[in-house]
Amino acid sequence: MPGRAMLSEVFALTPGDGAASGFVLAQLPRGPAPLLWVQDRVSRQEAGRPYLPGLGLPGPILRVDVARAADVLSAAEDGLHCTALSAVVAEIWGDPPALSFTASKRLALRAEASGLPCWLIRRGASPDLSAARERWRVVSLPSAPHPDDSAAPGAPRWRAELFRARDRRPGTWVMCYDPATDRVDLSAPFADGALAKAGHAGG
């Protein structure tokens, strides 16, 4: 999944859940090229700014704060013209008129033309019409067991539902980021009853 040159959307099932950002971070290409991260005002107010030193990415992060969804879309499209970037992440709150099907199609075509992944994080939003090639709903789950300390949190886990995709079958998975290998592992959904309960409670 990491590094696929297309537009993908990730919906946070609850606005304050950091799962959407964590899920996107786990998919980003690892390399020295800069990442562009754009947020609108309400996303910053409600979900906070990304803490850049804590993201663990090897390349620099260019963070752009703008006021409106239209400004996010414009900055993201401009970023996708720059092939020196590794990826573009754009956060938009709610269902603004600026984020029309036509606007999403422009981003999708530009991402594919430039060969860059573009991730659109949606909070407080409904999955209306979109040209995104993949659309996900993500919610946090209890962390994986820590290998050395049972009282400590382990690797982050998410319940991730791919509900629309152009070139793969939709489905739901438990996803776990493994920091040792810097990869995301997928497992059969809800094999653990506790995870199933947590996932449904979060959704």
Image (spheres, rainbow, N blue to C red):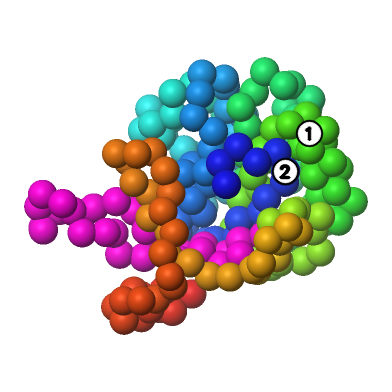
Q: Looking at numbered disc 2 in the image, what kind of residue is underneath it?
A: Met
x 61%, y 56%: residue: 10
Residue 57 position in % (x across, y down): 44, 29
Residue 24 position in % (x across, y down): 53, 46
Find out whether residue 161 is within the magenta segment.
yes
In the image, is residue 127 above or below residue 42? Answer: below
Q: Residues within 10 Å of mark 1 (few under 14, many from 20)?
A: many
The range drawn in magenta is: 135-162
Instruction: Label 2: state its secondary structure.
Output: loop
The residue singled out by tag 1 in the image is: 77
x 41%, y 34%: residue: 55
Residue 21: which numbered mark, if any?
none
Mark 1–mark 2 contact, CB under 8 Å?
no
Q: Looking at numbered disc 1 in the image, what kind of residue is underneath it?
A: Glu
Which is more toward the observer, 135 or 13?
Answer: 135
The number of numbered discs placed on residues in the rendered structure image is 2
Which is more toward the observer, 101 or 86?
Answer: 86
Can residue 113 be seen in this snapshot? Answer: yes
The residue singled out by tag 2 in the image is: 6
Which of the two discs, 1 and 2, sits closer to the camera? 2
Horizontal arrangement in the rendering, residue 172 relative to residue 79 (left or right): left
Residue 37 position in % (x across, y down): 59, 33
Residue 1 position in % (x across, y down): 57, 47
Mark 1 and mark 2: Cα distance apart in space: 12 Å
Which is more toward the observer, 40 or 81?
Answer: 81
Find out whether residue 146 is within the magenta segment.
yes
x 42%, y 43%: residue: 183
Can residue 93 be seen in this snapshot? Answer: no
